[in-house]
Amino acid sequence: MQLNVTGHHVDVTTSMKGYVEKKLDRIVRHSDHIIDVHCILTVEKLRHKAEAKVLLNGAMVYADAVDMDMYAAIDALADKLDRRVKKHKEKLADHHALEAQKVRPS
């Protein structure tokens, strides 16, 4: 997984980058088809925003989160991405084939 962390009106420290990397490692457990993650951390007055684009095999998943604290925004972003990657993975699975095998006797 290629991870790019950039900042808009904020200097991305090594601790911020490490925190983002640690939180986004969680989504790798759900899908091993993750190619690239681009995360943008933004500060607008008192609003801290974290957004990320995850490039999967055949799809792009986007999520963003806004909070008063940057680390809380990163936590919310990781939760959203986790849910969306799981949902994408479920869409790829062919659940109807299993139902057909259950109905038809062998």
Image (cartoon, rainbow, N blue to C red):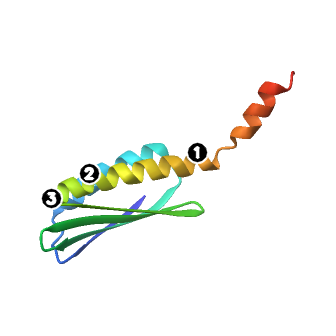
Number of numbered labels in the structure image? 3
Q: Secondary structure at mark 2?
A: helix
Residue 77 location, quadrant: bottom left
> In what quadrant of the picture does the N terminus appear?
bottom left
Q: Is residue 81 left or right of residue 35?
A: left
Dot 2 or dot 1, earlier in sequence? 2
Q: Is residue 31 visible?
A: no
At label 3, which amino acid type do we have?
Asp
- Rounded to the nearest whole Å, what is the CA distance between mark 3 and mark 2? 10 Å
Question: Residue at point 18% right, 68% down?
Answer: 12
Dot 3 or dot 1, earlier in sequence? 3
Q: Are marks 2 and 1 in contact (CB under 8 Å)?
A: no
Which residue is labeled 3 in the image? 69
At label 1, which amino acid type do we have?
Glu
Question: Residue at point 37% right, 45% down?
Answer: 26
> In what quadrant of the picture does the C terminus appear?
top right
Q: Is residue 52 left or right of residue 8?
A: right
Measured as percent of width and height from the top left, residue 104 is found at: 86, 26
Please determine whether, in this image, residue 104 is positioned above or below residue 81.
above
Mark 2 closeness class: few <14, some 14–19, many ≥20 residues within 10 Å: some
Q: Which mark is residue 66?
A: none
Which residue is labeled 1 in the image? 90
At label 2, which amino acid type do we have?
Asp
- Rounded to the nearest whole Å, what is the CA distance between mark 2 and mark 1? 23 Å
Please identify the residue farthest to the left as the structure is shown: 46
Please determine whether, in this image, residue 67 is positioned above or below residue 42.
above
Which residue is labeled 2 in the image? 75
Residue 95 location, quadrant: top right
